[in-house]
Image: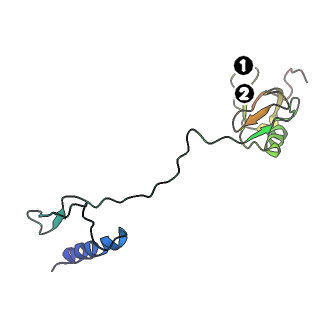
Amino acid sequence: MSTRRYVLAACIAVWPVLAGCSTPSADVGTEVKSVPGNGFTRSTDLPRIVIPDTPTVEGPAPAAQAYMPPVVCMNLQPAQNALQAAGVSYSRSADASGQGRMQVGDSNWIVVEQHPAPGGLVGEGDAVLSVVKIGEPNSC
């Protein structure tokens, strides 16, 4: 017998153990057919694996929320730290000048507006901090 046949025979012998049964059940097809040319056989139906019922949850998981701290006139990095301390790991920032600049160095920016207002409930990604570069005209 070739090595391939031994491996196939071992796989077939182990399958009932891996599938969690010792013999095929009556509702599983066990018809075996020869595959021309290679000496292997194959089953026309594979055993069905039944997964026990699991509880289902309708809709998305509720998002954790925290109270928005007051961060206007703060440097962007400490403002983000305050949000994290309140329980929100992810916040967004936007260039208040309208130029669409990215806030790469958070310590170079100052918060001039926040949404939601201080004390409002905020979840992950809900907090939006409008910022301008330090030294640019602002209301602070």
Q: Residue 94 carries which label?
A: 2
Dot 2 amino acid type: Ala
Disc 2 crowd, CA 10 A, few/some/many (<14, 14-19, 20+) = some
Discs 2, 1 touching: Cβ within 8 Å: no
- Which of 50/62 is in front? 50
Q: Quadrant of the N terminus?
A: bottom left
Dot 1 amino acid type: Gly
Q: In which quarter of the image is residue 84?
A: top right
Q: Quadrant of residue 83?
A: top right
Q: Mark 1 highlights which residue?
A: 98
Q: Is residue 50 shown above or below 131? A: below
How many angstroms separate mark 2 from mark 1 (CA)? 9 Å
Pinpoint residue 58: horizontal percent, then vertical percent: 55, 40
Disc 1 crowd, CA 10 A, few/some/many (<14, 14-19, 20+) = few
Relative side of 90 to 119, left or right:
left
Pinpoint residue 114: horizontal percent, then vertical percent: 80, 27
